[in-house]
Amino acid sequence: MLNVTELIDRLERLNAIGSELSRERDASRLLEHILLAAKELAHADAGTLYLVVDGKLKFEIIRTDSLGIAMGGTTGVSIPFPPIPLFDAAGKPNRSMVVAYSVLHDQTINIADAYTEDGFDFAGTRRFDANTGYRSKSFLTVPLKNHENEIIGVLQLINAQDAAGNIVPFAHADQRLVESLASQAAIALTNRHLIDQLQDLFESLINLINTAIDDKSPYTGGHCERVPVLTMLLADAVNRVDWGPFKDFRMSEKDRYELKIAGLLHDCGKVTTPVHVVDKATKLQTIFDRIELIDTRFEILKRDSLIAHLRGNIDAATHARNLEQYDADREFLRHTNFGGEFMNRDAIARVQQIASYQWSDANGHTVPFLSDEEVENLSIARGTLTNAEREIINHHIVVTIKMLEALPWPRHLKNVPEYAGGHHERMDGKGYPRGLTRDQMSVQARTMGIADIFEALTARDRPYKPGKTLSESLTILARMAKDQHIDLDLFEVFIKEKVYLAYANMFLEPAQIDEVDESAILTLSRA
């Protein structure tokens, strides 16, 4: 019989255990806490925690102190025992097993001595005792019932011990304490399960958005997957370094999760970006590549030259020169249409010169060979997008920020809009959409900026270029670091901690993974 002081102490311990259970985020550790706390309250030598899964009781945690047995949970030791069915193949209730009976009848079962108890099958217990020399005697089996009155598991304790270490029956006071713990434990398990389900649903919805974005274009498929991976690789490297400006920077698991979610959502605004802009593989592409229309016009010019020659308006030599010039111009425009890193002034002037040719359209009207819009597209200096189209692409980050800032983020995810919305900003304040400087940006946002650029440089699926090699990509990044486009300190971590190589081994083709002179790359970035 407990005195008042002992009872108060144990009730205070029960309350403390309840608080501990409510704070635990990891499911395996939560299950361990429940069993170990129950053993502590009831002074039990052994115990097992089962969960109800698909009509069976699955072993989750097993502990026997006197035998040194610890299986399941965080031990890394798997439990070899098969689940205990609640019903047999014919659907008949399994009332012979104590734990199954406890679930089926929603009843606590307190047994003083298993070897003298009638009505239950303890054959497995006797085999265990015979193999180990153990003596399983007193049993306390308590169902775990959640707030919806559903039994989600069973807590079974074995061999209560008195102060002298003797095996005794479980006292009624111990039973009531364990039942109270079981009630708290069931709620904690259910809450943890619901939180995990909501988190899974949340991440699934994010992945659904990203799948829709990536599926819009065969050229950007996987971008929304790869950028978060690279972001976390670099963030983890920054988190572990013990040198440089980030030696005191640390992220908790909550911080990591927040950055992961931001990475997954960094381009969610692209759901509104027109496909024909995202997919613009050539300068003249809209719904289709209009270079073929220009090919037809060249054929018309060649036909008109032939007609002029046959009518005696031009001689054979002039006609031949016309044909040669038209073929050369057509080939030039075909090459120009593919875009590239740089188009010089002479090439742009040649486009304008070709545009001055005259031809007759389907209505017989004499018109310039190229429209103003076609000249604008063919004169794009870098890539395949006009300034207007680039504005459309760039607008995705504005939409991303609007979408994310409209959501009621919980406290542990409140920085997601800032992290995701800052990956197109520059350290010198010349980025977009807000023109933030380095000092106005978090380390996480700066990290994502490097990840976004490096993924784009090395991606093999862009419509306007092949994926660059490591040395090419890092050289470009080094120049961007020097020009304060990206964070120089983060770039140094990116190189020294070989984050680029870890990513390359995950996503790049072997031909892209060439030799990198890290010293030269870092020297270039600081020049």
Image (cartoon, rainbow, N blue to C red):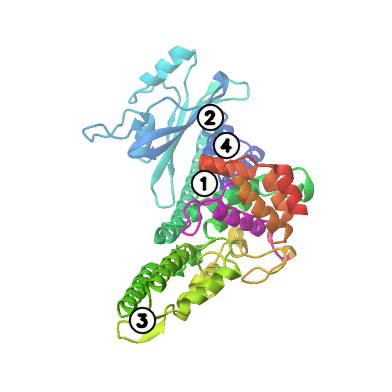
Observer-nearest of 107 and 340: 340
Give me the disc on residue 37: 4
Quadrant in which residue 412 is drawn: bottom right
Of the residues shown, which amino acid type is indicated by label 1?
Gln
* Above or below: residue 288 compared with residue 200: below
Residue 313, label in figure: 3
Answer with mark 3 or mark 1, whichever residue precedes in sequence: 1
Residue 253 visible at all:
no
Q: Badge 4 local density, few (<14 within 10 Å), some, or many (20+)?
A: many
| Magenta residues (range) | 440-469
Q: Secondary structure at mark 1?
A: helix
Left or right, residue 318 beside residue 171: left
Q: CA distance from mark 3 to mark 1?
A: 101 Å
Name the residue located 53 percent from the left edge and 35 percent from the top edge.
35
Which residue is denoted by mark 1 in the rendering? Answer: 184
Q: Where is residue 128? Give x, y as percent.
A: 43, 17
Quarter of the image that includes the N terminus: top right
Q: Earlier in the sequence, mark 1 or mark 2?
A: 2
* Disc 2 target residue: 76
The answer to whether 57 is drawn above or below residue 323 in the figure is: above
- Can the viewer see residue 445 in this picture? yes
Query: Marks 3 and 1: which is nearer the front?
Result: 3
Residue plotted at (58% across, 49% down): 230
Q: CA distance from mark 1 to mark 2?
A: 26 Å
